[in-house]
Amino acid sequence: MSDIAHPATSAARVHAAGPRAARLLPYLLSLPALLVCIGILVPFGTAAWYSLQRYNLAMPFMRGFVGFDTYLDFLGDPDFWNTVEVSAIYTAATVILELLLGLAIALLLRERSPLNNAISVALLLPLMTAPAIAALMWKLMTNPGFGVLSWLVSRFGLADFKWASDPHTAMLTVVLVDIWVYTPFIMILLLAGLRSLPTQPFEAARLDGVPARFVFFRITLPMLMPYIVTATLFRLLDSIQQFDIVYAMTQGGPGDSLMVFQVRAYLEFFQYTNVGRSAALMMILWALTYALSNVFVKQWLRLRERTHGAY
Amino acid sequence: MARIDGTSAFLARGLRTLALAVIVLFFLFPILWIVLMSFQTNEQILRIPPSLLFDPTIVNYRALISGKLVTAAGQLDLPFMRNLGNSVLLSSVSVLLSLVLGVPAAYAFARFRFRLGENIAFTLLSFRFAPPLLVLLPLSLYFQDLGLANTYTGLVWVYQLICLPLILWIVRGYFEDASPDIEYAYRVDGHSWWRAFTRIAIPLAGPGIAAAGLLAFIFAWNNFVFALILASADKQPVTVGALAFVTASGIQYGQIAAAIVLSILPTLALALYAQRWLVEGLSLGAVKG
Amino acid sequence: MSADPGLAVRALSVTFGRNHLLRGIDFDVAEGETLVLFGPSGVGKTVLLRAIAGLEPAARGEVRVAGRDVSMRGPEARGIGMAFQNFALYPHMSARDNIASPLRARGVSRAEIERRVGAVADLLRIGHVLGHAPKELSNGQKQRTALARALVGEPRVLLLDDPLRNVDAKLRYEMRLEFPRLLRTAGAATLYVTQDYREAMALGDRVAILLDGRIAQTAPPETVYEHPDSVAVARLFGDPPINLLPCRPTESTGGVQVAAAGLRLTLPAAQHAIGRDCLLGLRPEAIAVHAAALPGAAPAQLNATTPLHERLVVLLRAGGEEVVASVLGEVPVPGSAVWISADPAQATLFDAGSGARIAAPAPVREAA
């Protein structure tokens, strides 16, 4: 395995590695990556440690080790459960809608033609827009005074539609922004997947006169599954941690209606200076994403094996 | 496809065209509308119903670029150009540093099998999806102690958390795809390891390095939460600056629109200019990562 | 006595995890000599070349180039020229720059580079494509460019990794004729890897057969062909493959008598073969096919024929065994009854259990 680092035995000399410096080379080269790992692991460890403490920056004298008390307190805390619920709704809504929409667009653009390629390039633009800026754009568009969307819905009789300022429609608004920004990501992945599929199964199906619906559900979809799983994994893990769009749009409001995990953790830290609670929230979110990513990576590998055969 | 008669084929084509038109409208209209808005005065913006026909004005851009806005209430300072400068500085320096540090490491991961490499790769993979605040909140406390709070150095350092993993993953894939024989041949010719790396490996992985650098630049530019937590006004990039701007001058809609246009223009222009590399980088980063 | 060999390899081993790919390889290649390294695919021929070039980190052992131990040196400091199986041309450089690379590495002057690249390009007849990028070259030109790059630095040791593998049949034939002249000009100790025994026959001063991580036999190609040391070597070296017919030798005047496939041969083999289970090795060329009965010939059924190069490969059934013959000239149509005979001088006897050749007693020296 790691023969490069193997010391020379007395009986035979290492020769190909040449001077000792050559054997240290991979370690020297990966030093920066190692430093980044440390840069991640040290604050991670610190956060884990904070989450076990009663630690409020405003009350340093109260600081002390409390074990898992902060976590246990969450169980009876309606604010915490609100965060779980809001995050779950946000994640489910964005991932499902983006997946369906992204798949539909990819199927529409499947043929390679100048027009289709131009459209797929144009759809890159929302994805390249900073999510925080995208939220500001939609905030302007939904402005009750001059927003083009407010004007549009008023023409359909919804004169009093308040978008993100109304707790009932705030979720809808941020989900819309998320869809606008991230659907192209799914579209790009699935389009790359669709265009890389072997053509023979489709030609054979056409020769046999297999109905289009059957082709889609029995050939296209299964073969595309590894790409769908990958895209879902990426979006799921990003969505559950969404911060930029929600914070730039409403900072978690109105009320607690958009208090997703990271926004709550941010406010706990900077508004209530409650480091311990904030860290505990982040640890819970991390455990969640870690578990999700493990499940999905396994699923992805299995699907890939099935689709690509034995090798 | 099943056999379909002429009418339904025509109908299908029409529906497909309509669907594409709606999609293009949905994804491009917001950008178009903001661009139009940025060329309007506040009075034009506040007109109901909104109109596509208006006398374009560059007064918003002039105000942003000069940094001074004269209103009835008096003169207002607009620090937005400074935000733009910060974004350019932070993103380019971060990506350059990431390339200098990340390309050799990606090469080591691709060419040598060693245990430490697998561990680093695994750690980076598992933290690729970790919530950024998990790391940022303790860092904000450390930064106070280290004197790195609100410094470009500190920000560029933290931005490595965005850029380096991206570059490592994508560039590693490109190095792995290139045959090592070409480098070996160059070594046997009598060139040192370093020359084989700089004259052969890097040029051959050039498209991958460009794609990764481009993506890293865009992600760094678009980042919001890092600077929100670790920088104050004079070091903030456009993403945070635009939000602060909205809060500060809540009713100067024309300037806000112009600021948004200036904020997204560089990444959109880059994306259009290098779209093929970008798509490749995105797909590769996702599928291989 | 003699000078140091151009290339000396001692106790070279390569181990990947638990897989001992190469175990204790020893051989010398003299300056100006071509040693062909022959073996089935996956046996580690390329790994052995890479180990000699200093490109295999898992290698242990000693490599000496012109008497100097280079084991601890990197590939750039070993004084070796190498041509890779997939050419490994630098895609972003012209053919000229590809060839000039070893000279540039040594800081040779511009004029001298120009002269030597021109000379080697003339030798390989690629002077007219020096300005082309590798992707604009035909496979043959790529192959010649790769060879030119290996030769231009006038290395003491030349490693050629199956250089004709990826070129078409016609070019392979031409190059096989051209190589001896090229290698003589280079004057290096050449290690030439191939899987094609004809190439080995045509180019090798000696052949080393690599099998199961070890060198099974090193000898001039004719010797390997005519007197393979083992059944495995005999099977590997030669196409169509050797006939291996089970037999049990009996005592006879002047050697042993062997009966197989209806043939009766008297061989000068060692007496200890008598009564043991053996395999009679007969090259297809050693078997003659006759349309009519001859004294000593065995009856056979001619099943099929297929042309191979200038000869005709004949599939026969004789005495319950499949026999392959390779003949010059006409044979009867398939389905005919024929007679076969074999030249005992070209027969080899192997022990059926160990697979080792049963050596003939040393030929008695003619009395002076």
Image: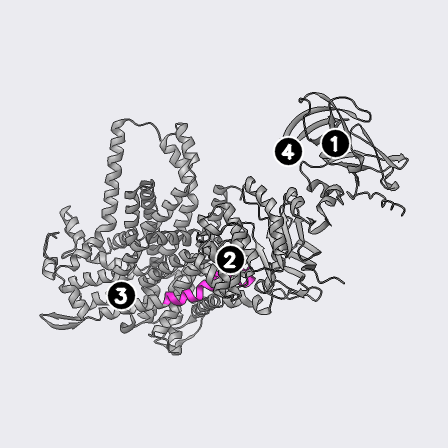
Labels 3 and 2 within one chain: no
In the picture, measured across the screen, residue A178 lies left or right of residue A156, that is: right
Q: What residue is pinned by disc 2? A: C117
What residue type is disc 1 on?
A: Ile
Q: Residue at x 67, y 52 (%)?
A: C35
Quick check: is B46 in the magenta stretch? no
What residue type is disc 3 on?
A: Val
Give x and y (percent) for residue B227: 32, 68
What residue type is disc 4 on?
A: Glu
Marks 1, 3: nearer the viewer? 1
Q: Label 2 is found on which chain of the structure?
A: C
Q: What residue is pinned by disc 3? A: B238
Give x and y (percent) for residue A257: 28, 58
Contact, CB < 8 Å: mark 3 with mark 2? no
Marks 1, 2: nearer the viewer? 2
The earlier-in-sequence mark between 1 and 4 is: 1
Marks 1, 4: nearer the viewer? 4
- Badge 4: few (under 14), some or many (20 or more) residues near its Cα, within 10 Å? few
Marks 4, 3: nearer the viewer? 4
Q: What residue is pinned by disc 4? A: C310
Q: Residue at x 18, y 67 (%)?
A: B64
State how far apart marks 1 and 4 are (Cα).
Answer: 16 Å
In the picture, measured across the screen, residue B158 lies left or right of residue C182, that is: left
Q: What residue is pinned by disc 1? A: C287
State how far apart marks 1 and 3 are (Cα).
Answer: 88 Å
Q: Mark 1 falls on what kind of element?
A: strand
